[in-house]
Image: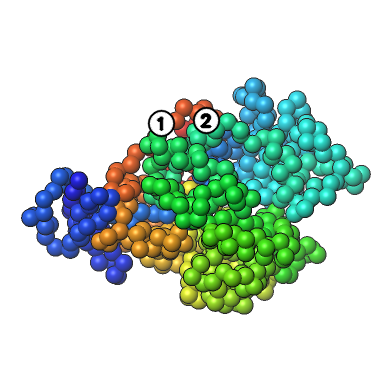
Amino acid sequence: MKTLIYNAKIWQWNKESFAKWMIIEDSKIVELGYTEVNADAKLDECINFNGELILPGLIDAHIHVLFTGEVSHYIDLNGCKSIEEFQIRVKLHAEKYPTKEWIVGFGWEQDLLSRYPIANDIDVFVNDRPVLLWRVCWHIAVVNTKALTIAGINTSLEIKGGIIDIDQEGVPTGILREEATSIIQKYVGETSNKIRKEYLVIGLNSCLKAGLTSVQTNDHGAWNLYEELQQEQKLPIRVFLTPDYDELGNIPLPNTCKGLLSCHRLKLFADGSLGAETAALRKPYKNTNNKGLLIQSDRDLFFKLQKAHDHGYRVEIHAIGDRAAQQVLDAIEKSTIEPKDRPILTHCQVLGKDLISKMNQCGVIANIQPSFTITDAGWVLKRLQDDVIQYSYCWKTLIDSNVVCAGGSDSPVETVNPFQGMYDAMYRAPPGQSCNFLPHEKLTFEEALQIYTKNAAYAAGQENKLGSLSVGYFADFIVLPLDVVHDPNLLLKVKPSQVWVNGVRRTPLDTNIEETNISGLYAEGKNGRIRVCTCCRPFQFLPRE
């Protein structure tokens, strides 16, 4: 089938010169024009786009699609400003869903609550069922006494890569950090593949509606589920799955590609999160002796990186703090991983001049989340030493240092909406406010678009197929009714009118699962609704409880 797209403003990378038409055949762009339409072409379909803007399909380089769908039935604790508000939301959710075996929520921040919540705070309202409530970073959780009892946690256990907080009498407070959360999580994880597939559909729908045509997603035990969805024609966008390292041996061979589904790399973790003060730093957090937590030893990390590489997989490593980044880069240097293998450092929120130089030398891709500059700005200055700040969230410095930066959301930690990510990369401040967090690190529109298109495609090893609207590339594109190119403020208002993947216009899929918390599906970020972007509002069907 040969389709003509005409009367459009089709983005090109040569200084805002727009093409006017393109012809699609067999999923790819076969012709492109700047003047008159090729009237001699034998066409099966002609579509008039009435002057609308067409951009390359947007790619999220780091997301959790399964979690994005799963949080649709969680308690939304984003924006809770007191322990009392925290308790009320838990109480209302428990009353509304009395048959749920486990009550799960996410999104709280101790900075907003004035302190860490503890088990007793939850027990006051829910003591007959186990409760697991994740901090916004998903690296710390608080549970109630019932959950502690079920998991057999009655003292501080030795947990490799994790911590169980205890009070002065040695009794667990309910706060579990990093790997300690796995003790509880094994009792909570959804085991029904039918339900997990529904979560994937919900997550994929949210991506599609937001304008994403490809995702590079870290979902555990999900390859077979994605395969089934594709066989059932329920895979609307491209999925580059990044399994966890511990799935090695139970996943497809490296570079497996089946239709819209691919697997090329493995995911490892080096440290925790800044908000939880578990990100590994070279200098301690302000007013403390705490330098965070390295999840594994230098030897173990090196061994795992080398083993993944020897098996033919590319590697993606979660590293937020500069000490973690240094550990990862040292391990890459010692391994046989070369720049052509394109190792990925995900988050890299705190770096240093020496680390950026080493990233360049090793060919390391910086997988960044632009919206972190907004949601973290309120407290990051309180946590990091002053001389560390200048190399924190330094996206522009990375780009100017020839480090490829790929943009992602880390959804459901931040909103799945890539236009919000582009806006945050450009302005580094909420609408109407001046940037006071390293304003020289702001990106231009073209740079912001590039990290979600060309650079994200490069991170997937698909830069010759995706990220541009050029002859020979896949026809993955989005259609926008607003000219965000010449007025980037419209990024906060725009919603795609059409999303095309592989030369086919895509529409959201039906789902049968009960969505108890629609706000979680379209997660607005770590500061909750106070910074929800305009284009997400149509997707909110239920009021906050």
Residue beneath the point at 62% across and 24% down:
97
Work out whether residue 279 can be spotted.
no
Drawn side of residue 366 relative to residue 20, left or right: right
Give the position of the C terminus as an image quadrant: top right
- Residue bearing the label numbered 1: 510
Graded by Cα atoms within 10 Å as few (under 14), some (14 to 19) or many (20 or more), the crowding at tag 1 reads: few
Drawn side of residue 431 relative to residue 118, left or right: left
Graded by Cα atoms within 10 Å as few (under 14), some (14 to 19) or many (20 or more), the crowding at tag 2 reads: few
Drawn side of residue 530 relative to residue 455, left or right: right
Relative to the observer, which residue lies in front, 145 or 345? Answer: 345
| Total labels drawn | 2
Q: CA distance from mark 2 to mark 1?
A: 14 Å
Q: Whole-percent x and y of residue 476?
A: 32, 52
Above-or-below relation of 42 to 399: above
Q: Which mark is residue 530?
A: none
What colour scheme governs how the chains and residues are painted in the rendered image of this protein? rainbow
Q: Whole-percent x and y of residue 380?
A: 65, 61
Q: What's the residue type where badge 1 is placed?
A: Asp
Mark 1 residue element: loop
Above-or-below relation of 93 to 435: above
Work out whether residue 157 can be spotted.
yes
- Residue bearing the label numbered 2: 194
Q: What's the residue type where badge 2 is placed?
A: Lys
Q: Residue furthest left?
A: 40
Residue beneath the point at 76% across and 34% down:
147
Q: Whole-percent x and y of residue 72?
A: 54, 35
Earlier residue among tags 2 and 1: 2
Q: Whole-percent x and y of residue 242?
A: 53, 52
Residue beneath the point at 78% across and 32% down:
150
Drawn side of residue 143 relative to residue 446, left or right: right
Mark 2 residue element: helix
